[in-house]
Structure formats: C-alpha cells, structure tokens
Image: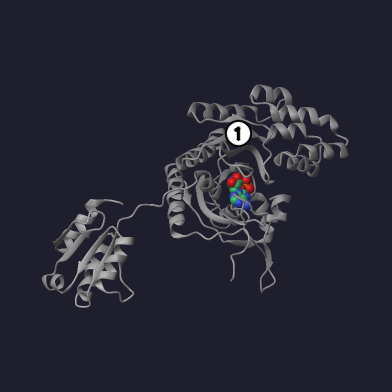
Amino acid sequence: MIQKPRGTRDFLPDEMEARRGVEAKMREAARRYGYREVCTPEFEDLELFTIRSGEGILQEMYVFEDKGGRNLALRPEITAAVIRMYINEAKVAPKPLRWCYFADCFRYERPQKGRYRQFWQFGAELIGADTALADAEVILLAADALNATGVTWDLRVGHLAFMKNLLADLDPVAQRRVMAHLDKKDFDGLSVTLAEMKREDLADPLSALIACRSLSDAFAIAGSIPEKDRVEQMTGILDESGVSYSLNFGIARGLDYYTGMVFEGFAQNLGAENQILGGGAYRLAHLFGGDDVASAGFAIGFDRVMVSLGDVPPAKDTIVGIVCTDEGRSFALSVARAFRAGGIRTELDLMGRGLGAQLAHASKTADFAVVIGKREADAGLVTLKNLHSGAQEMLDPAAAIAEVKAHGAR
Ligand code: HAM
C-alpha cells in the first residue's frame, strides 16, 4: 500500500470543514484591516530563498532541478515570494500595499506533532510604510487574527536594534551566528561560540537583555539606539490598543531578513512546537532588484493553531436525501435541482437501491428525506420527512424548500 510522504497529512471532510471554518475567521480579521489576498507560485527560483532567508531555512529546503536545468525550490515561506511579486507586478502601486495569504509551505524538518514538512501559513505583508504605526498595525492584525480563532496564546514583542547594538563590533557573519543561538534558545551553544570568538564579555549583557522586560531596562543595557523614538511610539500604540503583550529583547527570529521590530506568539497549551506566530519589519526588495522599501509582516502557523484548538466540530449543514422510485426519478431529479438552487445540500441515491434501502441510508446520513414515488410525481408534490422527529407531510417543492430552510443548520 502506498503511503503519503513523511511529514504530510491527509485531511478528511470533517477536518477540512473545521479548518476552513477557522481559516475564515483569520481571513475576516485581515479583511477588516484592508489586507487583500495574494497568491504566489508553490515553487520559485532557488535563489529567491538563498539570498537572505538564513541558514536554518536553507538546510530545510526542498530543492530540485527541472527538465530545463533550472534550480528551483518549494517555497519554505511566503514573504520572499510576496516581495518578488511586488517588484514584478506592483512596485508602482500606491503605498502602502496591504496583502495577505493563506498558503502551504514546505520545510524538510523532522516531523512531530505541530511540525510538518507541508504546513499552512496565514500571513500578511505591509509594504511601503515605515512608521511606528505601521509596525503596530501588523502586530495588532496578527493578534486579532489569532484571537479570532479562539486559541490562548502569549504575544512577545521586541526590536533587533538592542541586540544589534550589543553586537555592533562583530562582523555580520558572527552576528548571525550569535542570533541563531538566541533564536533556538541554545545558550550552551552561545557560550561555546562566544568563547571561540573570544567575546565572553558579551555573555552577561546578552543574558541581561534577554531577561529584561521593560524598555527603560533595555535602553540601560544596550545603550542608546537610533530607533528609540520609534520603539517608544510603537509600544505606546500597543499599550493604548489594549492588546496583551510582553516585551522581549531576546527575540532573534530564524530568518535573516528582519531589520527592526520583531514579534512572536506562543500557544499556551502546546508543547515543544508552541510557536504559532512570527513576524517583524524587514527589507528585502532591494536584494531582489527593486528599490529599497520598508515592509513588515507576519505568518501564523495554521496547523499549530488547529492542534492548539483540538477537536473543532465541523461546520453544520442541513442535508436532504432524495428518496425516489423508478417512476418518480425524473421528477426527483428536477426537485433535487430546485433544492440545490435554493442553496440546500441535496444528495440522491446513485446505487440503484430500493425505496426502503434509500430511506434507511438517508436516515443515517441526512436530516430530511424528500420522498418521491409515483403518487408524488403525478401530483407534482413531495413527501418531506424530518428524519430526527419522524414528522412528515406532503408539500409542493417550493414549500418543502422553505420548510428545510426554516429548520436551520443541524
Ligand atoms: P517563521 O517563524 O519561519 O516565519 O514561520 C511562521 C510560523 O509558521 C511559525 O511561527 C510556525 O507557527 C509555523 N511553522 C514553521 N515551520 C513549521 C512546520 N514545519 N510545521 C508547522 N508549522 C510551522 C516566517 O515564515 C516569516 N515568513 C514570517 C513573516 C512574514 N515575517 C514577515 N512577514
């Protein structure tokens, strides 16, 4: 028996309905902020992701050569692709651009609960706004979208300027090494790296910065940073909005393109893979051949949201089963068309079953049976049977449709 590839999942209808229901809540949050959906290819030139995505992502990428000898990669994330698309298609559009996406990504990771090789992200990118308000808008949208799903989670907000100030005299490669340890919370590895670099002096200020939870302490540890006003304005807006968050200057992010504000979200009821949100301000456009443009965005790990929510009941739908005899079939088909045109989920027998077997099947799978024998077909009527209460009456099709609609969802 052929199995699905490791790290991928199948979704049966109940699960898909539950997923679509949660997805719709996040989409609605994005709509309210004016973020419109975009879609990019599932695979891109490998180079798009090697330019600035960072070591971690590179090791996890699905890379292949196509028949034309091109080096391609399945997208490990969407941000780089969205910025490529912005440069290709929309760089003259009025700023800012507010875009969102719901799309699958591929990372060759060791699979476990909440970590998959194919997973879905709901994300947003705000392109061309370089203000504290823009930073705050992205964080607030992420918070609204996640809150709309019903997960309980913690929001941590930071800014890379503090850490970069502490690491200012390291070269960019060394900075990235240190940040990679911090991102993975690998403090043993960090000590080894600092010792190798003969920069043990950084250990104390780094751990003080990671532990500190207030702006004033962070300024005291990291010294004065040019972005001070911007950071203060942004946190002021967040405070006024009432969003619940904590400051965390240890956020380093696994991707290399971030330049300023960064934030992460953690589900309260998940284990090791509890990071359900990541985002920040970044600059990528100039690396892909466009003008330098400030952007900010985030992505929510949709599959982790679903794991955190646990069993979500599938969407309710009222189901009608058409039950008919051979003589009634032609009328039954027209009645089925009328029910479907009325927006009602309507199923009919495809198995050549007799009337009794059809009714037995309907009582297992439907809420109403619409029974059509010779008598009903001759009269242009249907027998509508409520399969929960057993009540039944003969009605014309329009009245039967109205009755089912009035019943509401199961
Ligand atoms: P990221 O932190 O790499 O950021 O991924 C965002 C979220 O995707 C994570 O917080 C996590 O919930 C989910 N995720 C990542 N890997 C997996 C996996 N293997 N299985 C299940 N879920 C996973 C980004 O991708 C950035 N593009 C976010 C961003 C948008 N920054 C600016 N704009």
Left or right placement of residue 84 versus residue 25 in this view: right
Identify which amino acid the numbered label 1 is placed on.
Val
- Quadrant of the snapshot with the N terminus: bottom right
- Is 401 above or below relative to 189? below
Residue 199 found in image quarter = top right
Closest to the observer, 176 or 398: 398
- What number of labels is visible? 1
Residue 79 appears in the rendering:
no
Is the shortest distance between ligand 1 and the CB of mark 1 under 8 Å?
A: no
Residue under numbered circle 1: 157
By what rule are the colours in the image chosen?
one colour
Crowd around label 1: few <14 · some 14–19 · many ≥20 (10 Å): many
Q: Residue, x 56% and y 56% (percent of image)?
A: 104
Please give left or right for residue 316 compared with residue 155 in the image: left
Residue 209: percent from left, percent from top = 71, 28
Q: Position of residue 222 (x, y in %)?
A: 73, 27
Q: Residue at x 27, y 51 (%)?
A: 408
Q: Nearer the viewer, residue 195 or 321?
A: 321
- In the rendered image, the vertical position of residue 75 relative to residue 356, given as above or below: above
Please determine whether, in this image, residue 112 is positioned above or below residue 261: below
Which residue is at the front of the view, 89 or 67? Answer: 67
164 left or right, relative to 268: right
Visible residue check, residue 316:
yes
Name the side, left or right, on which 15 lies relative to 210.
left
**Where does the image place residue 96, in percent across and percent down from the top left?**
52, 44
Q: Residue at x 53, y 51 (%)?
A: 92
Q: Secondary structure at mark 1?
A: strand
Q: Where does the image place residue 287, in percent across and percent down from the top left?
A: 68, 51
